[in-house]
Image: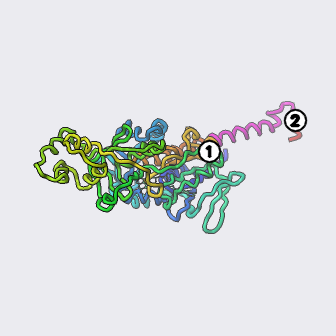
């Protein structure tokens, strides 16, 4: 048997999904080249580290899976391949021990992404991974070559043994992932769900007073409800509406409700830790002649919560009615903030179009990983975990597929040589003369 030369794999996209696949494949002796359009790797990963790099979450398995909504069943197989515990162990292997924060979110002790990314790139280089920066992938040539646009002009790369597309979603496009791949893949018959902002702010037409007095201030400890879903947490008042964890977590129901074309009214509980009876009692105990603002403050509302309550129209005077309003203040949502500043995007390559190795069924030899697949999740570490898990799963899928290709090639060459071997294939040695 002659020694096989290493398989060549092109990974396009140098974010977490592409890099973890590069790590796995290069560790197994394959030749890996990462192509990235930006001058440096992992820009969104670095941005994610700005406010504390939330790598994953300590939820139990079922709670974790449920975060992926309709995609949870599909995602569960990839999360088994590379679990949250595996992700923490991997970070630790790069000298970035993790800890679980009070919210259950998992962070590296350094909180930032930069030390982790630096150590990671050094490991990849040591494993022989090649990097081609400022290479913007623009599609395929007629024989499956990869086409890139670079500052030095167009570059054509011979068809590799396998390709992994890890091009990210479409949020924060200035960091490199702009969803431009969607049209390239649709043109090849791949089904791609429209990319839309996820984990994004809600637009609300505040009054001028609300904007000028409270934009930039937090609403601490609230619960927002829409269509039967309630999220407790914090929100930040902005000029155009609300931002922050509690609103981001409701992005999906908000997007779906807006798509119906009907007005979307969410309710905000400004005192989620107190029952209506308790709030009523506090209001009723106000001294005679006390101003409404003072009464509300005594009922535990911050000035910005009072501002938001006032936005809901004239306030009832009966304590029980006012308490009910405080527990369910209506806000009309007119839209969502765009992809430019969204944490992530929904939509992407349809899950049905992928096989069990994350290969695009319509494009044999082309695999996908990360945010470019049609799944979505709230913030809390679920996004990065899914990118890492699908990256590892795609690396496995690539190896299995390349193995099958090699076997198929070997058996067809064996069949050929058997056909052309006069002694074995043709005992009478009558047809061999022509070969
Ligand atoms: C502000 C912010 C904070 C976040 N915080 C967190 C957090 O704390 N926890 C969490 O779980 N998630 C967080 N996320 C989300 C997380 O960063 C992303 O889900 C994750 O980076 C997606 O990984 P990916 O590898 O799929 O894609 P990306 O990280 O987007 O990487 C894709 C790469 O492909 C490159 N590329 C795109 N098109 C081409 C092309 N045509 N040719 C060549 N290269 C191309 C891009 O330049 C990019 O480098 C945050 C996101 C943002 C914006």
Q: Residue at x 47, y 48 (%)?
A: 387
- Dividing the picture into quadrants, the one containing residue 211 is bottom left
The mark closer to the camera, 2 or 1, is 1
Q: Is residue 151 magenta?
A: no
Residue placed farthest to the bottom in the image? 152
Residue 203 spot, x, y in % from top left? 40, 53
In the rendering, at what x and y percent does residue 69 appear? 44, 39
Which image quadrant for residue 94? bottom left
Q: 10 Å neighbourhood of mark 1: few (<14), some, or many (≥20)?
A: some
Q: Which residue is mark 2?
A: 431
In terms of depth relative to the viewer, which is nearer, 248 or 138? 248
Q: Are there few (<14), some (14-19), or many (20+) residues within 10 Å of tag 2?
A: some
- On the picture, is 424 further left or further right than 160? right
Write down the residue under mark 1: 190
Residue 216 in view (yes/no): no
The picture places residue 156, in percent across and down from the top left corner, at: 67, 59
């Amino acid at each position: 048997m002659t020694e096989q030369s290493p398989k060549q794999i092109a990974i396009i996209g140098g974010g977490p999904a592409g890099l973890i696949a590069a790590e796995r494949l290069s560790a197994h002796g394959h030749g890996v080249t990462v192509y990235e359009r930006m001058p440096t790797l992992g820009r969104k990963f670095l941005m994610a580290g700005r406010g504390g790099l939330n790598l994953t979450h300590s939820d139990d398995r079922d709670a974790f899976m449920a975060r992926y909504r309709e995609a949870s069943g599909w995602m569960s197989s990839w999360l088994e391949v590379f679990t949250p515990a595996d992700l923490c162990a991997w970070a630790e292997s790069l000298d970035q021990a993790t800890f679980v924060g009070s919210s259950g979110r998992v962070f590296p002790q350094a909180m930032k992404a930069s030390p982790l990314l630096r150590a990671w790139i050094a490991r990849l280089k040591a494993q022989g991974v090649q990097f081609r920066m400022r290479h913007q992938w623009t599609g395929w040539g007629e024989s499956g070559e990869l086409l890139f646009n670079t500052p030095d002009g167009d570059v054509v790369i011979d068809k590799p043994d396998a390709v992994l597309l890890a091009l990210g979603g479409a949020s924060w496009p200035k960091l490199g992932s702009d969803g431009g791949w969607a049209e390239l893949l649709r043109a090849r018959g791949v089904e791609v769900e429209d990319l839309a902002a996820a984990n994004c702010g809600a637009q609300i037409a505040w009054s001028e007073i609300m904007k000028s007095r409270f934009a930039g201030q937090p609403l601490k400890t609230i619960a927002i409800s829409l269509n039967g879903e309630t999220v407790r947490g914090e929100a930040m008042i902005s000029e155009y509406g609300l931002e922050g964890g509690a609103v981001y977590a409701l992005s999906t129901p908000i997007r779906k409700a807006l798509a119906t074309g009907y007005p979307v009214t969410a309710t905000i509980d400004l005192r989620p830790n107190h029952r209506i009876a308790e709030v009523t009692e506090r209001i009723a105990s106000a001294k005679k002649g006390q101003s409404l603002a003072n009464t509300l403050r005594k009922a535990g509302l911050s000035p910005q919560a009072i501002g938001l309550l006032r936005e809901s129209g004239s306030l009832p005077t009966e304590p029980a009615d006012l308490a009910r309003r405080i527990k369910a203040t209506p806000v009309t949502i007119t839209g969502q903030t765009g992809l430019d500043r969204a944490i992530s995007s929904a939509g992407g390559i349809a899950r049905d179009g992928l096989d069990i190795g994350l290969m695009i069924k319509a494009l044999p030899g082309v695999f996908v990983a990360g945010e470019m697949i049609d799944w979505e999740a709230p913030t809390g570490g679920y996004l990065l975990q899914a990118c890492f898990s699908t990256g590892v799963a795609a690396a496995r899928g690539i190896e299995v597929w390349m193995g099958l290709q090699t076997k198929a090639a070997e058996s067809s060459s064996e069949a050929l040589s058997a056909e052309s071997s006069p002694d074995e294939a043709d005992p009478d040695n009558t047809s061999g003369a022509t070969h």
